[in-house]
Amino acid sequence: MSDERRGYLYGFTAYALWGFFPIYFKLLQPSPPLEILAHRVIWSVAFVALLLTVMRNWSFLGRVLRTPRLLGGIAAAALLIGVNWATYIYGVNSSRVVETALGYFITPLVVVLLGVTVQRERLRAWQWIAVGIGGLAVAILTVDYGHLPYIALVLAASFGSYSLIKKRMSLPPAEGLFIESAVLALPALGYLTWLNVDGGAEFGHVSATHTVLMLFSGVATAVPLLLFASAANRVPLVGLGILQYVAPILQLACGVLIYHEPMPAARLAGFGLVWIALIIFTADGIRSARASARSRAAAAAEATATPA
């Protein structure tokens, strides 16, 4: 198997695991979302710390601790991923899996808007059309829900902003996940301590299966991220862009087919517009990538042909 094909396998596996997350987090009930989040943070720290110890890769901490700007970026990233995780767990366990899937469908469009507003990037015409159709879809879904689909919007905004900060920091996945989880670990421990003192903790009081699943929430968090990192090193950006739709498609299937969440005609129309926007967005990205590749090839050929 070629290195690129192996990368596609890693990437598909990562997104498939994320796609089945609704099933996993549903199994963590009756724990409330904040208890699940706190355990996810703490066991992520423990698992990644074990992994880094096995890899003997703790040298990155010195660079991080000596760079205040990097520490500030990590703190911001930790806050955003904490909001994203909490919102996702709340959405899944309040029977709004379909809306969480919508959040990850519109994330690419939000990332484009962040590129315009934060990075001062200029959009191509087809990208503007895709964003406009996505905005129309949100308007239709707002009418259908009777309110803004705030779970979807918070998921898209938090993960899009998190991705932007991560791109600027350029930390490897395992190291980045460890530091971000470590930033969240102290408030998570504080919350769990209070919950146990108050008598409201479910962990250890439901069943052995529930306890084991809570313990493995850190592994469930880290493994897809590490698989994704392996894919990102082997697969072209356009390929990754297409793979990213695997997760929300599976999440939507979980919501409709497994948990029988409603999909009325207006909601289906809204999702249909989102999918049209994503097809336009993806097709434009592929066309642009191919044009850039041709330009680079032509420039390289010209440079080779030019005598020194």
Image (cartoon, rainbow, N blue to C red):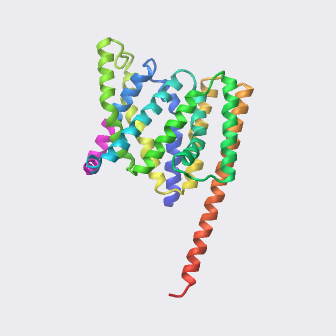
State the image quarter where residue 183 is shown: top left
Prevailing secondary structure class for the magenta stretch in the rendered image: helix
Residue 150 colored in magenta in the image: no
Give the residue drawn at x 33%, y 22%.
191
**Which residue corresponds to the image point at 74% horizontal and 27% vertical from the top-left?**
265
Q: Is residue 90 visible?
A: yes
Whether residue 288 is situated above or below residue 280 in the rendered picture: below
Residue closer to the observer: 191 or 7? 191
Report x, y in % for residue 152.
57, 31
Name the residue at the bottom extreme.
307
Residue at the (58%, 46%) spot, across then down: 112
Magenta-tinted stretch:
45-62
In the rendered view, does 283 fall on the left or right side of 187?
Answer: right
46 is within the stretch colored magenta:
yes
For this view, does 238 lie left or right of residue 180?
right
- Relative image position of residue 297 (x, y in whole percent): 59, 72
Name the one closer to the observer, 31 or 187: 187
Residue 138: image location, x then y, percent = 66, 33
* Residue 32 x %, y %: 43, 19
Taking 261 as reference, is 79 left or right? left
Relative placement, left or right, of 41 versus 92 is: left
Q: Is residue 209 visible?
A: no
